[in-house]
Image: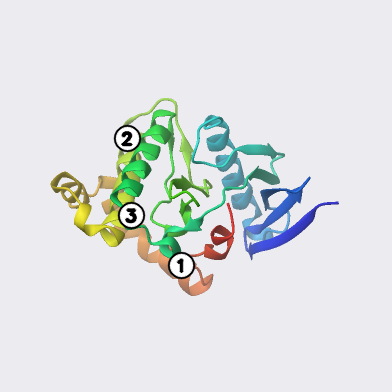
């Protein structure tokens, strides 16, 4: 029998930290998802599984342990979420940008780096990325992939501007000033509805899940 700690429970299921032979791992379980959202929860779980499988052996992201389409088990990464650690060293963001480039080189975009809890600061001060539900693995690396990769970078730079503004370069500020076409469309059309559903109806925020990430992922 595994020791288990519930970290998050919502309409998409549960996230637990479980210990197997004293080793912690994170389990995403869609069997408890709301009936009307179960199909979406399992689709997101499959996206996460594909992305993590493509990143096998790549440092700074969770390692996929197992999945059966209903549950996903992944490696636990010790660290604090960005908004709690508040890193102010340029070296952290330099390493985070390098990590992001490595992610893209392996044909994966994260797609959810606007949320600060999805970036961790590990005990040795290094970056890590978690929560790959919205990630996209695309070996074709077409135009949409490149635009989404650009938005990954822009979200990282927004965090750098918040926590380490003095280290922002002219080029980085220029990138922030030029959102991609998908980003502009999202901001003007889909985002207002998304914010209403997630923040008003579901009670989420961009820092949702901080309790999960502060002790984990």
Residue at the spot x=31%, y=43% of the render? Answer: 94
Q: Which residue is mark 1?
A: 205
> Whole-Å distance between the Cαs marked 3 and 1?
17 Å
Q: Secondary structure at mark 3?
A: helix
Residue 40 image point, x, y percent: 59, 51
Mark 2 or mark 3: whose residue is earlier in sequence = 2
Mark 3 or mark 1: whose residue is earlier in sequence = 3
Front residue (pair 163, 184): 163
Q: Which residue is mark 3?
A: 186
Residue 102 falls in which quadrant of the image?
top left
Residue 190 image point, x, y percent: 37, 58
In this orientation, does residue 112 appear?
yes
Q: Is residue 70 left or right of residue 142?
A: right
Residue 192 falls in which quadrant of the image?
bottom left
Local crowd size for mark 3, using a 10 Å CA cut-off: few (<14), some (14–19), many (≥20): few
Whether 204 is drawn above or below 135: the answer is below
Residue at the spot x=70%, y=46% of the render? Answer: 71
Local crowd size for mark 2, using a 10 Å CA cut-off: few (<14), some (14–19), many (≥20): some
Residue at the spot x=75%, y=48% of the render? Answer: 22
Q: Is residue 165 left or right of residue 91?
A: left
Q: Secondary structure at mark 1?
A: loop
Q: Is residue 210 left or right of residue 74?
A: left
Residue at the spot x=39%, y=29% of the render? Answer: 105
Front residue (pair 212, 10): 212
Tally the numbered discs: 3
Q: Are marks 2 and 3 in contact (CB under 8 Å)?
A: no
Image mark for residue 146: 2
Residue lying at the far top of the rendered structure: 140
Residue 47 falls in which quadrant of the image?
top right
């Amino acid at each position: 029998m595994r020791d288990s700690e519930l970290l998050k429970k919502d309409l998409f299921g549960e996230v637990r930290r479980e210990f197997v032979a004293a080793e912690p791992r994170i389990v995403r379980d869609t069997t408890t998802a709301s009936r009307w959202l179960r199909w979406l929860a399992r689709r997101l779980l499959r996206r996460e599984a594909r992305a993590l499988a493509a990143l096998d052996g790549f440092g700074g992201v969770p390692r996929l342990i197992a999945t059966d389409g209903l549950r996903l088990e992944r490696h636990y990464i010790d660290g604090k979420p960005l908004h709690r650690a508040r890193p102010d060293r340029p070296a952290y963001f330099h390493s985070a940008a390098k990590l992001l480039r490595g992610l893209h080189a392996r044909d994966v975009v994260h797609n959810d780096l606007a949320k600060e809890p999805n970036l961790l600061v590990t005990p040795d001060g290094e970056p890590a990325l978690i929560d790959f539900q919205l990630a996209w693995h695309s070996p074709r690396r077409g135009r949409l992939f490149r635009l989404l990769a650009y938005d990954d970078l822009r979200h990282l730079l927004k965090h750098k501007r918040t926590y380490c503004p003095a280290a922002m370069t002219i080029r980085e500020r220029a990138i922030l000033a030029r959102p991609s076409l998908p980003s502009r469309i999202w901001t003007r059309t889909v985002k207002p509805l998304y914010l209403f559903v997630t923040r008003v109806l579901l009670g989420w925020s961009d820092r949702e899940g901080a309790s999960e990430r502060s002790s984990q992922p």
